[in-house]
Image (cartoon, grey):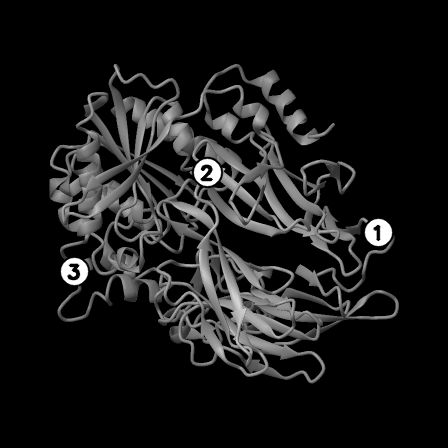
Amino acid sequence: MKYFLSFVLLLFITGVFAQNVMSPELLWTLGRVNGSFVYNNGNSICYNVTTYDLQSGKRSNFISSMGIDGKSVKSITQGVPADNATLLADGQVLYTVEGKLKSTGTNVPGGLESAEGPIFSSKSGNSLWSQSVKIDKTAADLYPEYKSSTARIYDDLIYRHWTEWEDGEYNHIFVGIKQADGSYKATDIMAKEPFDAPTKPYGGSEEYTFNAAGTTVAYVSIKKSGKEYAQSTNSDIYFYDIASGKTTNFTLGMMGYDKSPSFAPNGTHFAWTSMPRDGYEADKNSLWVADLRSGKKVNITQNWDGTVEQLVWTDKSDKIYFVAPMNGLTSLFEAKISYAKDGTPSAIIRQITNDEHDYSAIVGVAADGNIIAQRTDFNHAVEIYSVNPTNGNAVQLTHVNDGIYSTIGLSKVERRITKATDGKDLLSWVVYPPNFDPAKKYPTLLYCQGGPQSALTQFYSFRWNLQLMAANGYIVVAPNRRGMPGFGQDWNEAISGDWGGQPIRDYLSAIDDMAKEPYVDNSRLGAVGASYGGYSVYMLAGKHEKRFKTFIAHCGLFDMQSWYGATEELWFANFDLKGSYWQKPQPKAYTDFNPMNFVDKWDTPILIFEGEKDFRVPYTQGLEAYQAAELKGLKSRLVIYPDEGHWVSKPHNSLVWHHEFFRWLKETL
């Protein structure tokens, strides 16, 4: 019973699958592990495991706890599927079962029925959550007599975002003051403001927090609207004093993304991440620490050429642990904080982990001082590890998928350094098929990463899964081309304004170098990718000079002019494309780097995936590309999902995606 979830999954798998490599069905049967928090004075870990039933597509989530040594595993919810594990002020765990609140204690607090992502102050007992609030009028409000109308009426940008149309509702932050009967009296601290906190569409409870005393709230919001909002990344961190009801803009004058608010346990300091430039969503993300008494703010990573992601304070407020991409991996780092006599902070930055794994998230800090973190690599989905911050040694705590992986062949993964066309070193990850035999020849896929400024590290995706591609007999080459974080800010920013330039040359350099190997079948090369990766595929289709035998593009940008006219986050387009298509002279994005302009050179089969709810890269981009391929007489295929956005997330849709992906490769490669 030690690892009951792993045991149950293994019994199911061995009864259903008789195979020795990864398959789409096996991939979707893996338990998806996610750490929630460390609690019980740092001696216990709350985590959840999500599974999917392949027949029905139904999702089930199981919440468990274990000791920081990985032992004493037990179900928090008595084996019943549940969601939204939250630590209550008294140390008990709150969760939901079929939408109803339940607790491991004797009482379930009232007043939280509409709360999203509640957190609780152990000091004051107060609660903090987000909740949807209707503010703007819609067609139904303007014309109540025409109840069956489905009209949407807009007077300004931004009218839709990623997968959702604006509907007049906003995320607001609520403070709940604990009452004598244990319920919470709610106050909307944003009153009637037409702004979102947390930020839409993907902000969550990481964007709001209490101070140590539970008397002050910090939250993230972009308090802009319309065209200004569509073209700005200037989020700020606001402080709300519960006693006075006063709100102040703590990061006023800091013009880029300000996020990840975190009060130090000492009560006198505050940390957050900040980007310097408005409109540049992939700018260097620096770690800032402020002395709340003097108000002095210090960029403690100013002289460190990296970009910070998640951060966590230690109990003594003398260290901050954070994750950051570095040299093709997502690693753990330490900022050792020193305070001057006046409270001004400074820091020494040190990398903790150097092993060939991704430490994708910090769950918390244990009582023994170890970092509880999520770890993955190309061969393994997320499991939870305990990491010694002194030497980086990691011990696996959860073993949810060990039994499954022990029954299949895993891939060999190598780093490969290629000289790019400008003489710089280009790192590629190379993933080989299980039981790779260098005496044989293998078809090879060039994997083109999206973003465009997303790190290409040892990730484990349930769609773009390099292990699964290799298990189907393909060598996969994944280059860290220009534009990816982890190699310094200059490398990261080099892609902006140059989408079809050096990054595409990097891709060609990587595949040309790999093609020199005797085990690579040069007559069977393919290129695949999504988003910017899909754009890359479209560009390569017009530039590859017979290198590739097949292409697969998912939600790629095909015509930069029509894309600019229909996308929503215009700050991204304005910075990375260097402006609108009506500018004079036109930016190269609309001329030299526009895939549509090279369709006359298309001569290779292409498969195109699209989601109709994708507002980031509207699905019509794929329709344009597919129509061009068809009219040119090329073998082509369109797979389109009316209920998916930029990602394919539904189980059965994803399984069709995988099978179409490999069916296409079998037909064309």
On the image, the x and y values in percent for residue 556 come to 30, 47
Q: How many marks?
A: 3
Q: Which residue is mark 3?
A: 588
SS at circle 3: helix
In the rendered structure, are the residues bearing label 2 and label 3 in contact, judged by CB atoms less than 8 Å apart? no
- 450 shown above or below 582: above
Please provide percent x and percent y for residue 212: 68, 69
Mark with earlier residue (2, 3): 2
Q: Amino acid at mark 2?
A: Tyr
Task: Report the amino acid beneath label 3.
Answer: Lys
Q: Residues within 10 Å of mark 3 (few under 14, many from 20)?
A: some
Tell me if label 3 and label 1 are in contact, CB under 8 Å. Answer: no
In the image, taking residue 352 as reference, residue 185 lies left or right, namely right
The numbered mark, 3 or 1, whose residue comes first in the sequence reads: 1
Residue 63 position within the rendered picture, expressed as x and y whole percent measured from the top left: 69, 42
Q: Quadrant of the N terminus?
A: top right
- Quote the CA–CA distance across marks 3 and 1: 61 Å
Identify the residue under disc 1. 105
Q: Is residue 505 visible?
A: yes
Element at label 2 = loop
Q: Can the viewer see residue 622 in this picture?
A: no
The Cα atoms of the two marked residues, 2 and 1, are separated by 36 Å
Q: Which mark is residue 441?
A: none
Task: Calculate the distance from the C-alpha at mark 2 to the C-alpha at mark 3.
Answer: 34 Å
Which label sits in the foreground, 2 or 3? 2
Question: Which residue is at 22% across, 42% downward?
Answer: 507
Question: What residue is pinned by disc 2?
Answer: 460
User: What residue lies at 17% left-to-right and 28% top-to-bottom?
Assistant: 516
293 horizontally vs 182: left or right: left
Residue at disc 1, secondary structure: loop
